[in-house]
Image (spheres, rainbow, N blue to C red):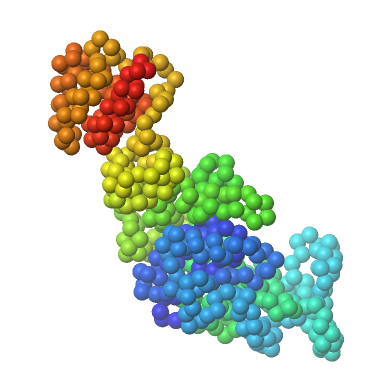
């Protein structure tokens, strides 16, 4: 094991990156940064049948969006161990398979699919292992000459690891402690196929070794593979440099009942992917956090807490604070339930923390598309009035009255909502009165409005209610003086006159 911390995120590009995968990448990133180490992106694409076009690019863009750029890796620049895509490293694996063959830790197997089916047919629990391999057509059962003949005739084969019948494989997991699995529970996994393509196991172990990976931090679903990997390190003579293992808890459905899946997101209305994804085969679109109006910083913070906590009450952490606080010791063993309400809470908190200018910048395109061009300064002032009410960036669409006058005042007749009578209220007089108000002092404006109400024998509350309906279109929204100062007296006057005419 190298003394420098070097970790990798090693996804297979078989579809869009699930947020569970993003969390794995994030924990690797935080661990690397915390320890002054390197974070590598390696694309594990040896199973060419399962490749999905666009998935690799999606992985790269997702990491970029959330702000956890690897130091080395596909899409992030070459480092000393390039290339970082396994299909581009194909020629490096065979030598290790041959090393295992020569040392007697692996063997050729020529069994066809039909042969394997037959072995399975006679034994429901069949697995290719120390007890059954004598039934197969492999270099342990066939003569040396026969094996050479088959190889020279280019017969299809695989190279399998040769595991002992009954031996405990023991390794320490940084999260789970000691793990012991007996080889009787394992099978002689395929390491390399005759086309030279390694399987996940061989490629993964060889690359971790060659790339001097110090810690393998990955999802719990890979825990069952770890004993095999330990055996590979041992058989390849690399046990002393074997990385430390840390298997992360599963990300569970909100009710804790099983692994969080794409279907849960569709069913419960939240994204399970960082970015929107269009399935290249079916054209089905799956929603993404980005397009739903989440801030990457909020998603990052939320994900960090799905399976880890700092041991304090603090919940809002910047990436730098997370890096500082992160440790493998504080990762939980139990699965982490996805909490959609919490995700929303994080997002709303991060929106509140934005400077008005930043928020305006983030919603500008959406506002322009929905409500037309806005003056830059106006947009900044407008968003400042509703910042506290946004859960998602896209919620700005709910505040159209900031950008255009409303013509609709809801289903209820206006006269039932507002108590303003033509005998006491003259919109022209109100407009003239407003125009004299040139200050932006909202507290003073409130007093002025009350004075207007008093001198016209209107209850201040009724006037405010009427103004609110005129300006917003309904009985909600920011404080009236704030709105008037934002919209300006001209626009306020126009809206008031218009609303009055519909009473
Ligand atoms: N290629 C595996 C995956 O798709 C990586 C497992 C590992 O990190 O070792 O998740």
x and y, in percent, of residue 351 in the image: 34, 47
Q: Position of residue 89 (x, y in %)?
A: 60, 79
Q: Is residue 491 above or below residue 276?
A: above
Image: 295 above or below 215 = above
**The quarter of the displayed image where residue 267 is located:** top right
- Of residues 274 and 204, the one nearer the viewer is 274
Percent across and percent down for residue 18 are: 54, 56
Rendered residue at 78%/71% (across/down): 132
Q: Nearer the viewer, residue 46 or 116?
A: 46
Residue 439 position, x and y percent, is 15, 35
Name the image quarter holding the C terminus: top left
- Quarter of image, res 423: top left
Q: Quadrant of ligand 1?
A: bottom right
Residue 53 can be seen in this image: yes
At horizontal 75% and vertical 79% (from top left) the residue drawn is 194
Residue at 39 percent of width and 75 percent of height: 37
At 45% from the left and 59% from the top, the residue drawn is: 65
Above-or-below relation of 79 to 280: below
Image side of residue 370 versus residue 424, left or right: right
For residue 5, side relative to residue 15 (left or right): left
The reply, left or right, for residue 55 in relation to residue 137 is left
């Amino acid at each position: 094991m190298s003394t420098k911390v070097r970790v990798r995120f090693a996804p297979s590009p078989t579809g869009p990156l699930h947020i569970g995968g993003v969390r794995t990448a994030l924990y690797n990133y935080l661990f690397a940064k915390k320890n002054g180490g390197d974070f590598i992106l390696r694309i594990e694409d040896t199973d060419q049948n399962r490749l999905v076009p666009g998935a690799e690019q999606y992985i790269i863009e997702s990491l970029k969006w959330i702000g956890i750029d690897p130091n080395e890796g596909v899409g992030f620049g070459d480092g000393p161990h390039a290339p970082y895509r396994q299909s581009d490293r194909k020629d490096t694996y065979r030598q290790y398979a041959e090393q295992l063959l020569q040392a007697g830790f692996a063997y050729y197997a020529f069994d066809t699919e039909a042969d394997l089916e037959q072995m399975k047919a006679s034994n429901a629990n069949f697995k290719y292992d120390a007890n059954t391999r004598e039934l197969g057509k492999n270099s342990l059962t066939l003569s040396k000459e026969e094996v050479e003949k088959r190889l020279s005739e280019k017969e299809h084969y695989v190279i399998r690891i040769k595991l002992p019948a009954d031996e405990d494989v023991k390794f320490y997991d940084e999260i789970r402690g000691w793990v012991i699995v007996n080889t009787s529970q394992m099978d002689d996994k395929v390491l390399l196929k005759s086309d030279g393509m390694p399987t996940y196991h061989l490629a993964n172990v060889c690359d971790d070794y060659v790339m001097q990976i110090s810690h393998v931090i990955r999802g719990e679903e890979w825990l069952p593979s770890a004993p095999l990997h330990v055996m590979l390190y041992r058989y390849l003579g690399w046990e002393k440099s074997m990385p430390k293992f840390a298997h992360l808890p599963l990300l569970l459905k909100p009710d804790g009942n099983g692994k969080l899946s794409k279907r849960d997101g569709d069913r419960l209305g939240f994204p399970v992917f960082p970015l929107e994804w269009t399935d290249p085969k079916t054209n089905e679109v799956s929603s993404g956090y980005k397009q739903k109006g989440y801030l990457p910083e909020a998603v990052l913070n939320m994900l960090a807490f799905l399976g880890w906590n700092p041991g304090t009450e603090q919940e809002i952490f910047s990436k730098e604070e997370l890096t500082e606080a992160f440790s493998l010791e504080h990762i939980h063993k139990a699965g982490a339930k996805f909490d959609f309400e919490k995700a929303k809470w994080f997002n709303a908190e991060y929106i509140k923390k934005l400077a008005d200018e930043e928020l305006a910048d983030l919603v500008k395109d959406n506002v322009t598309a929905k409500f037309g061009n806005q003056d830059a300064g106006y947009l900044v002032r407008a968003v400042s009035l509703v910042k506290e009410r946004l859960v998602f960036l896209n919620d700005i669409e709910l505040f159209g009255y900031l950008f255009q006058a409303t013509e609709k005042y809801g289903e209820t007749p206006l006269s039932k909502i507002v108590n303003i009578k033509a005998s006491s209220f003259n919109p022209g007089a109100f407009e003239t009165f407003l125009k004299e108000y040139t200050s932006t002092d909202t507290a003073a404006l409130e007093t002025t409005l009350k004075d207007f109400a008093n001198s016209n024998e209107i209850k201040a509350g009724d006037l405010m209610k009427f103004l609110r309906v005129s300006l917003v279109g309904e009985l909600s929204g920011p404080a009236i003086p704030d709105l008037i100062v934002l919209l300006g007296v001209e626009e306020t006057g126009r809206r008031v006159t218009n609303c009055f005419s519909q009473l």
